[in-house]
Amino acid sequence: MGFGLGLSFIFRIAVNVASGHTSFASIFLNLMQVVQDIISPLPSTLSRYFNLTKSKGVKRGNIFDYYLAATALDNGVDFILTNNADDFSEIEGFTATTLEEVRKIIGEHE
């Protein structure tokens, strides 16, 4: 996700919230428009993965989560929408939130 695309998404959401025309569906559709690029591991991803996991004592069940975060961070993505945000909570520089948290935020503005 490019920086400009992220700002465009945030701007559209802000306009929708300010005008009172925000719904979960509209945010989801805007998000899908932003997620146009497919990211993949880069040559540096494995090194980033090892650096992220080196001091954390990563559990076997979280290995994929850390690799996903390393891949995302290498591609300039520092945020993920997931059902298991707690699995990403110790990854420095990476934010994870749940759909439920998004619904709460949106609900405050509807």
Image: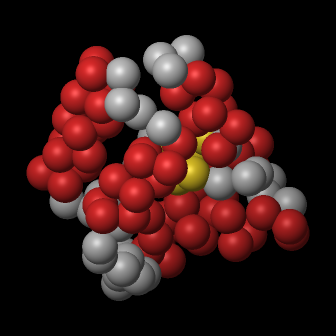
User: Residue 11 appears in which quarter of the rendering?
Assistant: top left
Q: Residue furthest right?
A: 60
Residue at image point 29% right, 73% down: 36
Query: Looking at the picture, how far across and down is residue 71, in whole percent?
Result: 46, 70
Residue at image point 49% right, 77% down: 46
Is 90 placed left or right of 6 in the picture? Answer: right
Query: Looking at the picture, how far across and down is residue 25, in whole percent?
Result: 50, 50
Does residue 5 appear anywhere in the picture? yes
Query: Looking at the picture, how far across and down is residue 75, in whole percent?
Result: 32, 67
Residue at image point 50% right, 21% down: 110
Does residue 91 appear anywhere in the picture? no
Rendering colour mode: secondary structure
Is 61 placed left or right of 56 in the picture? Answer: right
Of residues 60 and 3, the one nearer the viewer is: 3
The image shows residue 6, relative to residue 104, as above or below, that is: below
Residue at image point 47% right, 17% down: 109
The image shows residue 28, relative to residue 15, as above or below, that is: below
Query: Looking at the picture, how far across and down is residue 50, in whole percent?
Result: 58, 67
Instruction: Locate the N terminus by quadrant.
Output: bottom left
The image shows residue 63, relative to residue 82, as above or below, that is: below
Is 46 placed left or right of 73 in the picture? Answer: right
Q: Number of numbered discs present?
A: 0
